[in-house]
Amino acid sequence: MEHSLTRFVRVLRNAEVRVSPAETLDAARALEIAGYEDREHIRAVLSATLAKTVDEKAIFDECFDRYFSWHAPQNEQSEGSDGDEPAAGSFPIPADMHARAEDSQANEGELSALTQLLMQGDQTAIQMAIEAAGRAVGLDKMRIFTQGGLFSRRILDAMGWAAMQADVLALEQRPDDATPGHSEGVQLKQLGKQLREQVSQHVERSYLMYGSGEIRELRESVLRSARLTNIERRDLDRLRKMVRRIARKLAARYSRKRRVYKRGLLDVPRTLRAASAHDGIMFEPNWKQQRKDRPVLIAVCDVSGSVSAYSRFLLMFLYSLGDVLPRVRSFVFSSELTDVTPLFRDNPPEVAVEIARQRYGYGSTDYGAAFRGLLEAAGRDLDSGATVVMLGDGRNNYGDPALAELREISRRAKRLIWLSPEAESAWGTGDSEMLRYRSACSEVRLCQTLTHLERFADDLLRNRSQN
Amino acid sequence: MNERTLPPRLQTDLLSSPDEIRTGFEAMRYICSLQVATTVYLAYHLQKPILVEGPPGVGKTELAKTTAAYLGLPLVRLQCYEGLDESKALYEWKYGKQLLYTQILKDQLGDVLKGAHGLAASVERLHTFGDIFYSEEFLEPRPLLKAMREPDGALLLIDEVDKADQEFESLLLEMLSDYQLSIPEIGTVRAKQTPLVILTSNNTREVSDALKRRCLHLYIPFPDAELESCIVRTQVPEVTDSLRQQLVAFIQAIRELDLKKPPAVSESIDWARTLLLLHAEALDEKLVRDTLNVLLKFEDDIQSVGDSLHSVLAEARKPAR
């Protein structure tokens, strides 16, 4: 049972449910107390001890169904043996198949253990045998999908495939009683084929549960440092998930402290108030404290052609940080500036980003118009508490750079951070105005990959309200 | 693991199996899923706290109350809020009493110190009397300490733990894993009888991992139609079967809509009571429109449900079986 449990925990970890060793121990103890009789009971027990957020519960249910349906006979031949059997079937560890296979090879007169097993047609027993053999050859260590064939082979060998093949030959060539012997041989061959099919299915599923996790981690680490424009369509979904996960992590880190206590500064009114209960004697000194403010963040994104991929992730990032950055105002522009805050309020970030890109992403970029538009539209939000985040390549199509307007924005806001998808070496080349714009900004950062975005958000949150 | 003895009064059949708990709760008009019953069962036998999460109004607090009543334990409740600290949750010294006693005992002091010469000797003499003013006599137990000192065990409900600060969570850790509290002036207080602890959270912020690790986790979602129908039946038995069917189907349907705050179980029950008062036999459009404010608490929600009311209602009125 412990083995079954620890492997299930590994499946969960692969599926991004965080399970600590202590929780695994809890689960084992809980199962001991509650018993293993009923599948739904086991599910309830493991769910309470292993999966500890709402998201994890959903993943848990999926994994549980997959893992504990392992032994459910999927062959049509087995008649109606469903119900509690799958759960019960996965726990007992059957006798060692090696021993049985070798044993049968010794006395040649009899059929091998595997042959007997196949002939009996007990699907549960066959699945259990596959499982046991898989464990014996270390199937859960399989890492790469192409190893599938190799592992299938090894499992079949461990189950005594050779002995069974010998039986097939022996049955086919049995001299006396030709017809029934022959048909038995054919039948056995057929069963062998089925077995091979079952084994390869088993290997595939096992790979999906154990092996794919590490590949995924590898893939994600690659994606983190890939340029956001180069990300392929099929990876978008994965990237979105990563954005959300990173955002959650950041939110958890920064949502904690909302107050700073100024030790040593007495809050006189509160202390006097508290003292009135004790005859005016000040037992309870109250210290002054300061609430951390939650400043306005104004995001201004270029959504024209080349830069739009970056804008998409920046916006997604900012809105996924809703817990710690509740007041984000966002504007997008290409030829003119539009306030998309309501769009993001009414739609989930992914959808809103797409709509904004499609609706406003046309026309040639005009930074001058964007700055003027911002000064007008942001109005009172653009004050000394606001942080303005500009995202764009600063390529203004040789138009009026409107540096004065940008300086005005910078003057009114607390900080003006420019995120540039182009490296410093490209600034000032062609129609790029970055060198000039840089002079007006508090900070210019490179923003090409998810890691850059993450670092930016981290700094943003760390610096908020330190004044 | 050190074995703690179970309270003698509880070594009955009440907690022999999850199903037993479930039937017991049902008799107390609290209908729950197997998951809920199993978690309560485990919490008791593993002596671990339960962290209950779920949307508001699905009966998280009610679970604690029912469990307390079911097991005959006193319910000690601690409502969390931002700024909750030790002196509100753990203990406080009775300053007033201390002050009063020092005043009264001032005269006695002369007797005590009679014969002692010099400051050093007086202090020496005082030391022999111990810290009378910082003894249990002057300790004002707050919910956490109170739950620990209940002689027969207690059910401690820490409500909406997500509203409290991060620091408070850390404070809870010692109590939740070892069932003991450290009071600097007195020492470590161990629980006389391990209390059963239920924490609830509305998910306004993520509860820390350290806390989660120490707890069993229970998520109570909105109930499915069958369970909800069952709940409404036990809570408002006077409602006719057909009306209940429609009502549940309707509520299940509008939970699917995109609402700010979807109606919870408590709202379903309120609505059932309202319909009962209005002597409704079946749902009709006018009736629903007039009573929608029982179910939905935001003007926007009422608006958006009102818009699609006709089709949703038609769907709900279809015989479900």
Image (spheres, rainbow, N blue to C red):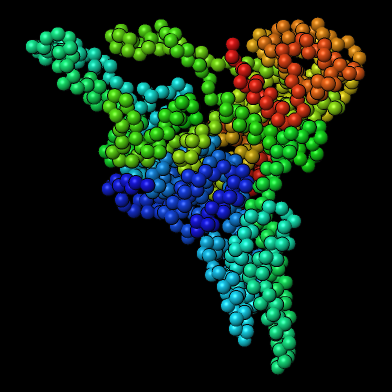
Q: Is residue A203 above or below residue B3?
A: below
Q: How many marks?
A: 0
Question: Would residue A125 be found to the left or right of residue B20 on screen?
Answer: right
Please state which of residues B203 and A155 is positioned toward the viewer in this rendering: A155
Q: Answer whether residue B81 is visible to the viewer in this image.
A: yes
Q: Quadrant of residue B235?
A: top left
Placement of the C terminus of chain A among the 4 image quadrants? top right
Q: Residue furthest bottom?
A: A176
Q: Residue A377: image x %, image y %?
A: 75, 12
Q: Quadrant of residue A428?
A: top right
Q: Residue B240: image x %, image y %?
A: 51, 46
Question: Would residue A331 be found to the left or right of residue A97 on screen?
Answer: right
Instruction: Identify the residue shown where x is 32% and y is 46%.
Output: B4
Q: Residue B112: image x %, image y %?
A: 11, 15
Instruction: Identify the residue shown where x is 50% and y is 45%.
Output: A21
Q: Is residue A190 above or below residue A398?
A: below
Please state which of residues B68 and A37 is positioned toward the viewer in this rendering: A37
Question: Would residue A102 be found to the left or right of residue B126 on screen?
Answer: right
Instruction: Identify the residue shown where x is 41% and y is 54%.
Output: A33
Question: Would residue A131 be found to the left or right of residue A235 on screen?
Answer: left
Instruction: Identify the residue shown where x is 47% and y is 15%.
Output: A261
